[in-house]
Each structure stands twice: as structure tokens, then as C-alpha cells.
Image (spheres, rainbow, N blue to C red):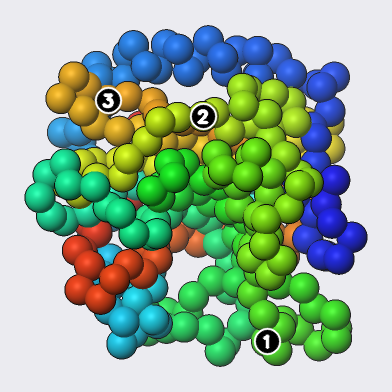
Amino acid sequence: MAPASTGATPGRALNPVNAYSVFYQEEVLKVKMKKMLGSIALAAFMPIVAMAGSDSGTLVSNPAVNSGFDFYYPTALSKPLNALQVGSPVKLQARFVWDGPAGQAVTTAQHALVAFTQKGAANNWVNASGQLLWTHGVGAFVSERGLAMELWFRNDPGGNGVQDDPGDSYFWDQTNGRCAYIVSVGPTNGLCLASTPSPGGHLTPASFTLKKGVAYWVRVSLEREASNPAWAVLRAELVEETSGGAVVVQTGSVGFMVASFFPYSGQVMEASVARTPGPAGEAITRFVAFDYGF
């Protein structure tokens, strides 16, 4: 399924004759149950967000720094690469809130993301903590289009390391028929996802407006594929806090080859949060990140 022009290979259809076919059948029921029980679970969970296993801060769009792109690594939430196992998902989630008048729509193209990542180049952007931006990884984000999933990589055609090679990624949202968008290429008509939980990957549709002052939870979990542990599955959720409780807005899943997106065996999978730039002076995005509770 992956384009021949890229070295990284995401989005392979999962083998339906394995444990994941059972998972996807159950997932449909889980999504329905989460919509009913989300407000109860979230209300019970909120008081313990500040306990161990969490981190918090702000992400700022400053055009003078990294062209307005801001990122941060909650290092206590990072995981060793060997933690990625069959039947034992690694998890990370973040609660994002854009500052500003509650309910005011964010009309510009921007997003906030949570991911597990690795670094492969010493010439990337540097954040306020002196840390380099990642080159590889797997995660999800919330944008004005709702939930999206993204896989970062760098090809190395020269065989001399990725330092001199441009960064690239695949991502999926509910536009373009849920087919992959490749940053270096643009929208494609391949690597398309189903609109309901499916062994080949999915992204559910939603009518969504990104708003200031509203809390959005982006959740990711990674788990190796039982029938072929060289592959893993990214599962993602977007949850919105409303006056009536927490609502699961969208869910998604996609398969990926582990070595293509976590190529450095000596590195951990770094917990990562970020926001892409909005207009100059755009509101701060506040976050709380943690690795439990779902």
C-alpha cells in the first residue's frame, strides 16, 4: 500500500485472521460505550491529573522562534522502545486548551499534537529548553478538521544519515476521503482508511469545530501486531469536554512498520507535545500530558 518512492511504510492492512480482527469488532461497541460513560470516567479522573505520571505547561506561537512552531518533551512519560510489545500497549494522552473567549472558533489552520518520537538529526529546530525537534515518530493531533494521525520519518537515499535529508510525514484526517497526505507530495488517493473500525485502519467522521476555551483530549496507544511483531498499530481518540460531559468525537487506527518510524534502537520513544503556528500573537495553548487513565 505504501508509495514506492518512500522508504517508510505505513498503513499496511492488518491481517484479519489474528487478534486484531477481534479487537476491531469490540472497538465498535467500545466507542458507543465510551460516549455514554465518558462523562463519568472523566469526572472521576480529573482530580488525579496532577499526580505522578503527568506534566503540564504552555505552547506558544511565536513567529520569531521556529516559525511559530512550539514543542515540548514530558520526559517522565517517555517509554523504552522494548516496551512496545504484543498485548501491552504504550499510552500517552494530553488535554489541550486554546486560550481565548470560551466557545470562539479557531478559524486558522493549526493543531496540537501528542506523540512518541525519536531524534535523528542535530540540525533541527530547538525549543525553549534547548531540545531538538524530532525526526521520527507516531502520534495524533486535533485541528480545525478534527482528529488526525501522523507518522514522521526521513528517507536516507545517500546512506550517510538523515542529517542532510528533509523531514517528511504521512497524515490522515477526515478530508481527502481519509486517504494519506504525504507532506513532500501532497494529498494522495492511496493508503485510505475506512470510516468505521476496520482491520485495515480507520478514522471515524465527525462534524467538528475547534474552539478556544474548550478542553480537547488527544489519546494515542501503540501496540505490536500479534501476527507480525515487526508491525504495530497506532490507535487514537479525540475527546471533547462539553457542558453535558466528555464526548468521544472521533477514533482512528493505522498500522505501521516499527523500524521505519522508530529506527534508533538506542533511543527511547520520547513523549512529545506540540502546536503548529497560527497567526502572529495567536493564543497560547495549555496542556496537561499523562500516560494513564484510558
- Could you say where residue 291 lies in the image, as x and y percent from the top left? 40, 43
Three-letter amino acid code of the residue under disc 3: Ala
Q: Secondary structure at mark 1?
A: helix
Residue type pointed to by label 1 = Gln
* Nearer to me, 136 or 268: 136
Three-letter residue code for mark 2: Pro
- Within 10 Å of the Cα at label 2, are there few (<14), some (14-19), or many (20+) other Cα atoms? some
Q: Earlier in the sequence, mark 3 or mark 2?
A: 2
- Residue 81: x percent and y percent? 63, 55
Q: Which residue is mark 2?
A: 205
Label 3: which residue? 246
Is any atom of residue 28 visible in this view? yes
* Residue 105, image x, y percentages: 24, 47
- Specify the farthest residue to the left: 101
Residue 31, compared with residue 182, is above or below; it is: above
Q: What residue sits 37% from the left and 16% below the top?
A: 35
